[in-house]
Amino acid sequence: MEEFKKRQISFLLQLIGVSVVLFAIHSYLLYHFTQEIQFFFPVWQVYAFHVFITLILYTVINYRFSSGKKDIFNLFMIMTFLKMALSILFLLPLLLSDFESKQPDVFNFFIPYFLYLFFEVFALTRFLQKS
């Protein structure tokens, strides 16, 4: 259980660092290049969603791995599918609304989505290689 806590704290610190950097870059780009575009979701809500979902996914996989189950590929695939479903639920108010310009919001959501997915895969691969 000590390994679980060590990996979890390390991942949490990395996640916070990556999130702060991505959020700062994203906010900077939006401020300088899209001042005239009105967004449905504020950027902080998008990042809060991604941080929360990424942390939950990593925690479940880390716990399962720490409890002795070394085959986590199926769990990762199920959790990734669940993440996709929750992403659709998150975007559902936008998709069902009469909001004029939905495309910038969708890009605003899915660019960080794929960056966080890459970060998850990188972090999980790194701790699995150490084992």
Image (cartoon, grey):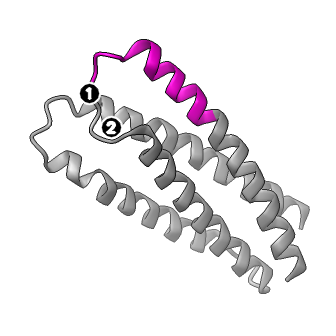
Is-magenta flag for residue 55?
A: no
Residue with the most extreme top position? 33
Image point 62% across, 62% down: which residue?
55
Residue at x-position 9% and y-position 40%: 98
At x 64%, y 69%, the residue is 73
Q: Is residue 122 visible?
A: no
Given the image, on which type of amino acid does mark 2 rest?
Val
Binning the other alpha carbons within 10 Å of mark 2 as few (below 14), some (14 to 19) or many (20 upward) gives some
Between disc 1 and disc 2, the foreground one is: 1
> Is the residue 95 above or below the residue 68 in the image?
above
Picture quadrant of residue 35: top left
Query: Which residue carries the number 2 mark?
Result: 106
Query: Quarter of the image containing the N terminus?
Result: bottom right
- Specify the principal SS of the magenta part: helix
The answer to whether residue 43 is above or below residue 64 is above
Q: Which residues are magenta?
A: 22-37
Whether residue 15 is visible, yes or no, is yes
As drawn, 110 above or below 29: below
- 37 left or right, relative to 18: left
**Percent x, y of residue 68:** 79, 86
> 81 above or below 120?
below
**Of residues 43 and 3, which is closer to you in this image?**
43
For residue 38, the mark is 1
Disc assigned to residue 20:
none
For the residue pair 104 and 35, the one nearer the viewer reads as 35
Instruction: Give the x, y percent position of residue 96.
Output: 14, 50
Marks 1 and 2, how far apart at CA: 13 Å
